């Protein structure tokens, strides 16, 4: 099973700042990492798939990069609605499809 | 626009069976090359993929749950279902139904999610 480790667990930033979230895989997963955003009481929402492709309707301030074992989600300038929990997920080696433990982006 | 809606009992007793249904609207469960699956989230914790069924009715399960879980589809009702038995309190979670595409080299990301339904396992 591929283990995804996300860091940091919590990121405290102010609106307008840049957020950089990390996801590290226990083995190479190629480019097959997705990122999701989850707000309290809501279902997760797909942001990025295959490392760098924005899903439909996702603002351009969200970008993804990486390959192999190291992946990054960047939010270029935080908007108030971006404060949430973010999960990475891999699809290279399955079953099982696995998720990271999440990074919470909260307001400083 | 495709929508998914989970339904089922909110309370299940330990050792009994958790049964959930996902109703698909705005599209057919038989059109396209998709997987239809389930993901769960225990209270205050992260996401765990449970299992999926493909457009060709092949099933895939999380190894840790494989002995207890069944995902099936009813094309006549445009629904798919999750059955988990026997349950323990550790199965308490929000359960989401999802759609993901067969990308040719495996299962794509989870593009479409239901709103989720809470299941509590308690006596």
Image (spheres, coloured by chain):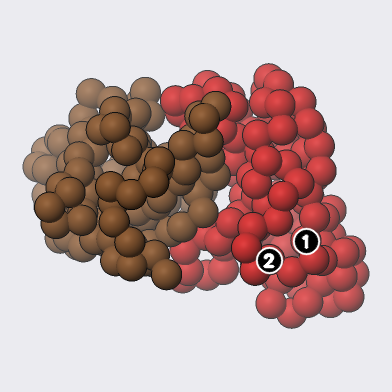
From the viewer's perspective, tell me whether residue B68 is left or right of residue A2.
Answer: left
Respond whether the residues carrying marks 1 and 2 are from the same subunit.
Answer: yes
Q: Colour of chain B?
A: brown
Is label 2 in a helix, a strand or a loop?
A: loop
Q: Which mark is residue A58?
A: 2
Name which residue lies at 21% across and 54% down: B79
- Whole-percent x, y for residue B43 in the image: 41, 56
Instruction: Supply the letter of whichever chain is red.
Output: A
Is label 1 in a helix, a strand or a loop?
A: strand
Q: Is residue B53 above or below residue A15?
A: above
- Whole-percent x, y for residue B29 in the image: 28, 51
Q: Is residue B32 above or below residue A97?
A: below
Chain hosting mark 1: A
- Marks 1 and 2 in Cβ contact (< 8 Å): yes
Name which residue lies at 12% across and 43% down: B17
Name which residue lies at 22% across and 49% down: B80
| Residue linked to disc 1 | A62
Q: Which image quarter is the C terminus of chain A in?
A: bottom right
Q: Is residue B19 above or below residue A17?
A: above
């Amino acid at each position: 099973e591929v283990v995804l480790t996300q860091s940091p667990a919590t990121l405290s930033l102010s609106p307008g700042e840049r957020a950089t979230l990390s996801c590290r895989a226990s083995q190479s997963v190629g480019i097959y990492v997705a990122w999701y955003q989850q707000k309290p009481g809501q279902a997760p929402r797909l942001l990025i798939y295959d490392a760098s492709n924005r899903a439909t309707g996702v603002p351009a301030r969200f970008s993804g990069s990486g390959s192999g074992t190291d992946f990054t989600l960047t939010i270029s300038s935080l908007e108030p609605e971006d404060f949430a929990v973010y999960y990475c997920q891999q699809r290279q080696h399955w079953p099982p499809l696995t998720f990271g433990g999440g990074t919470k982006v909260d307001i400083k | 626009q495709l929508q998914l809606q989970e339904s089922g009992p909110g309370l299940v007793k330990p050792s009994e069976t958790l049964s959930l249904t996902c109703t698909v609207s705005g599209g057919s469960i038989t059109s396209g090359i998709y997987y239809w699956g389930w993901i769960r989230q225990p209270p205050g914790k992260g996401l765990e993929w449970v299992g999926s069924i493909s457009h060709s009715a092949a099933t895939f399960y999380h190894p840790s749950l494989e002995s207890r879980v069944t995902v099936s589809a009813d094309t006549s009702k445009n629904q798919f279902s999750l059955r988990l038995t026997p349950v323990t309190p550790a199965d308490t979670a929000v359960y989401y139904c999802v759609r993901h595409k067969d990308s040719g080299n495996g299962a794509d990301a989870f593009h479409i999610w239901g709103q989720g339904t809470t299941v509590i396992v308690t006596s």
